[in-house]
Amino acid sequence: MNPKAYKKGSLTVETAMILPVFMTALLALVSILLMYLAGQRMQMQLINTAEDLAVKCSDGHNEALSAIRDDFVDSIPEEDLRFIQNGKDGIDMSGSDLDDPEYIVLSVRCDLVPLTGSFGVLSVPYSRKCLTHIWCGYERGYYPDDEYVYITNDSEVYHRDRECSHILLSVKEVSPNQVGSLRNMNGGRYRACEICHARLTGGRIYITDDGDRYHNSITCSGLKRTVYAVRLSEVGDKRPCSRCGR
Ligand SMILES: [Zn+2]
Ligand SMILES: [Zn+2]
């Protein structure tokens, strides 16, 4: 056999074998990335839905979960729906809690799949929860001559922006064996909440970035924080927030 011809042939065979594998891997990577982004957008949409509800429900108005789910599902763009197993039908919001007079808990569960048809039955369980306080402040413009700012009980600053990230209380669900290694935004450890008698045995626990307790109950009053809208002339010696106070 001519050695030159042999060599040339083997290279072609290798290329023919590796190229599809490489392309498949690349495609898998891209679709996993897109699937992840779809999940992120769904989480943002969940937060927006909860915030809208918080305002809507502030006058005691009740919204049915089925209507909330319909709106939420309709807000998911077509290009994201294809990453959700069974599309709109695959979205489960039954873990939501709308019965608390102070809080709204929205929950979304589904299975995410990379592009259907390409990678068989691979699926990733997706679950997000959003807890928001029903709006309890005064209406802006109630005293049109005075500017309104936002304060919380435990803070020495006031905020001009209601949506300031220093106010937004994000509750995170963590597993009990993680909590020992976690630190809050001031670098402090988390201790057991006295109010809900939190224990590290069994179940999930809840923490916030700016809190120093872990909780067993997501509705524990220790996890709650009230935001007040007050007139700027009433904030006393509170300083403007470094982020939104200018
Ligand atoms: Zn602020
Ligand atoms: Zn607690």
Image (cartoon, rainbow, N blue to C red):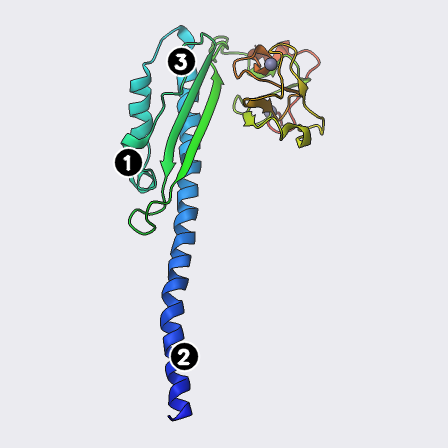
The residue carrying mark 3 is 98
Instruction: Give the crowd class for mark 1: few <14, some 14-19, many >=20 residues within 10 Å.
Output: some
Tag 2: amino acid:
Leu
Q: Nearer the viewer, mark 3 or mark 1?
A: 1
Image coordinates of residue 115 in percent, x first then y, are 33, 47
Taking 219 as reference, is 26 above or below it?
Answer: below
Q: Are marks 2 and 1 in contact (CB under 8 Å)?
A: no
Q: Say which amino acid is labelled 1.
A: Asn
> From the viewer's perspective, is residue 181 above or below residue 236?
below
Which labelled disc corresponds to residue 11?
2
N-term-proximal mark, 3 vs 1:
1
Quarter of the rendering containing residue 27: bottom left
Q: Mark 1 — residue?
A: 86
Instruction: Find the distance from the CA under tag 2 to the CA under tag 3.
Output: 64 Å
Secondary element type, mark 3: loop
Q: Quadrant of the C terminus?
A: top right
